[in-house]
């Protein structure tokens, strides 16, 4: 076939054109500041505890137990002073 040398030349040209862009993108230093978490505020600690508790309870619809998640949250609401009439 006579197209093989042309195809090979086009591929070589395309690689030669893209190589500087790829190398340049990888060599560019990151300008995004790195986030380092500090000490959590008391409110953030409570929120983290609630989220941690819910994540540890399997509440997926197909295999989990949503009731356990709801009961855990109801317990937290009661501890916060919310009356039972407002929970369920």
Image: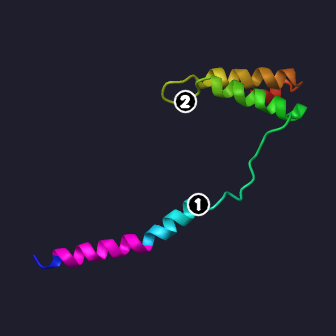
Please name whichever residue, 4 or 54, is drawn nearer the observer in this view of the structure.
Answer: 4
Q: Please, which residue is most extreme toward the left here?
A: 1
Q: Secondary structure at mark 2?
A: loop
Residue 59 is situated, as x and y percent measured from the top left of the image, at 59, 27
Q: Which residues are magenta?
A: 4-17
Q: Is residue 10 visible?
A: yes
What residue is shown with label 2?
A: 60
**On the rendered image, what quadrant is the N terminus found in?**
bottom left
Q: Which mark is residue 77?
A: none
Q: Is residue 3 left or right of residue 78?
A: left
Residue 15 is situated, as x and y percent measured from the top left of the image, at 38, 69
Q: Is residue 84 visible?
A: no
| Residue under the point 83% across and 22% down | 78
Residue 76 is situated, as x and y percent measured from the top left of the image, at 80, 23
What residue is shown with label 1?
A: 27
16 part of magenta stretch: yes
Please name whichever residue, 26 or 66, is drawn nearer the observer in this view of the structure.
Answer: 26
**Which quadrant would residue 4 be assigned to in this image?**
bottom left
Q: Secondary structure at mark 1?
A: helix
50 part of magenta stretch: no
């Amino acid at each position: 076939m006579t197209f093989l040398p042309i195809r090979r030349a086009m591929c070589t040209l395309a690689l030669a054109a893209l190589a500087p862009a790829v190398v340049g993108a990888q060599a560019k230093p990151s300008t995004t500041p790195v986030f380092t978490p500090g000490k959590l505020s008391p409110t953030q600690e409570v929120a983290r505890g609630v989220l941690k508790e819910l994540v540890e309870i399997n509440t997926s619809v197909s295999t989990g137990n949503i009731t356990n998640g709801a009961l855990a949250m109801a317990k937290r609401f009661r501890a916060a002073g919310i009356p039972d009439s407002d929970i369920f």
